[in-house]
Image (cartoon, helix red, strand yellow):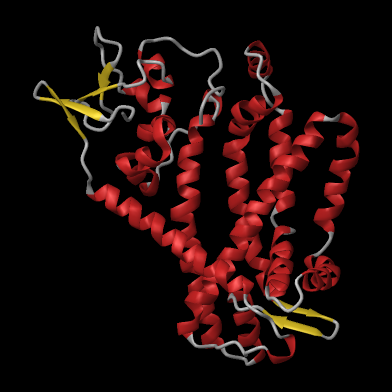
Amino acid sequence: MEHHAEVLQGGRWYQHGPSWQDLAAVLLVLGMVILMGVGVRQMVAPLVVAHQPGLSLSPAALPLYTLRTVTRMLAALVASLIFTFTYATLAARNRRAEMILMPLLDVLQSVPILGYLSFTVVFFVSLFPGNVLGPELAAIFAIFTSQAWNMAFSFYQSLKTIPIGLDEASRSFRLSAWQRFWRLEVPFAMPGLIWNMMMSMSGGWFFVVAAEAISVGNLQIALPGVGSYVATAIQQRSLAAVGWAILAMTIAIVLYDQLLFRPMVAWADRFRPEDTAAQTVPRSWVLDLFRRSGFAARVAGPSWSHVAEGGPREADAATFRSSDPLVRASPRSGRALARCHSRGRCLRCVAARGIRPRLALVGRF
């Protein structure tokens, strides 16, 4: 049985049925999966450097080019996130490693992108000969160098500024290093890290031309994308094509901001310390859509209940005074009642009974 899955109306409990939110959530997820699948599929095609097809400056080709560029940037963002979690964590926890890794990070971020391309392109092309995956990895690595350093510094700074009270509470709970990382350090750093991810993603647009229009020695490779489209338009002095490219970039930025970053910002606000909480709570229509949909709850299971309906902060405002600790007011309508099927052990029900957890950040997120 789903957590808070039944609503009391007219003295009887009713199960939520499929709604338009469920249909919209399913279509949104399927659409994103299909688009990413199309973009990834284009990255493993055969490559013949001497007989590359010329890039088309037709506006009809821009949607596919934009999709491939955004796919590369998202892949670089995932790689940057993995690098951030490993590199910054090692530097923050090990004093000797910190003395080496942090100055090295300063040096790495000062190297221009063309400096990395000069030796990585040959390596990746030779790693996957005859396949476009080699140049694609070189382009992703070039974009990675424009994203990773900023995120690593942000995560490192967050780990070094964890309040002593939270650190002592995590020790009193006897959390392992793995549990401490995912239940304290990552949630505490999440608000700042997400904003730096947005900045890194935006900074990557400045390097897509150099990353996609690869030119090292006698090797000339133009990967289909917005960057190579702009490079071709500049070579042919087509201002109209440059205008179409700017329009495509604007639409792409708005889409991934609304579908990816805004939901992440709204979700991560729950981990912000109370003394630094924003006066205006960030909202996202995508996150609200999934919260109102039963599709995510069916897929994610009971863990989704801690994300749905806004988490502990909004649950406090919707607390219902009842003798039954398992029955509370629904945050959606304020009138209907919702029954907790985890026997009141979830964080929201604990808050409703007035029992404050000793460590707000330790728990599921």
Which residue is farthest left?
10
Horizontal relation, residue 289 to residue 269: left or right = left
- Vertical order, 94 against 87 (above or below): above
User: Residue 220 lies in what quarter of the image?
Assistant: bottom right
**x and y, in percent, of residue 167 in the image:** 68, 18
**x and y, in percent, of residue 100 in the image:** 90, 40
- Vertical order, 302 against 126 (above or below): above
**x and y, in percent, of residue 333 in the image:** 21, 31
Closer to the camera, 337 or 200? 337
Which residue is at a point 48% across and 75% down the rendered structure image?
Answer: 63
Which residue is at a point 39% across and 21% down the rendered structure image?
Answer: 348
User: Residue 50 lies in what quarter of the image?
Assistant: bottom right
Which residue is at a point 37% across and 56% down the rendered structure image?
Answer: 28
Horizontal relation, residue 102 to residue 281: left or right = right
Horizontal relation, residue 362 to residue 7: left or right = right
In the picture, which quadrant includes the N terminus?
A: top left
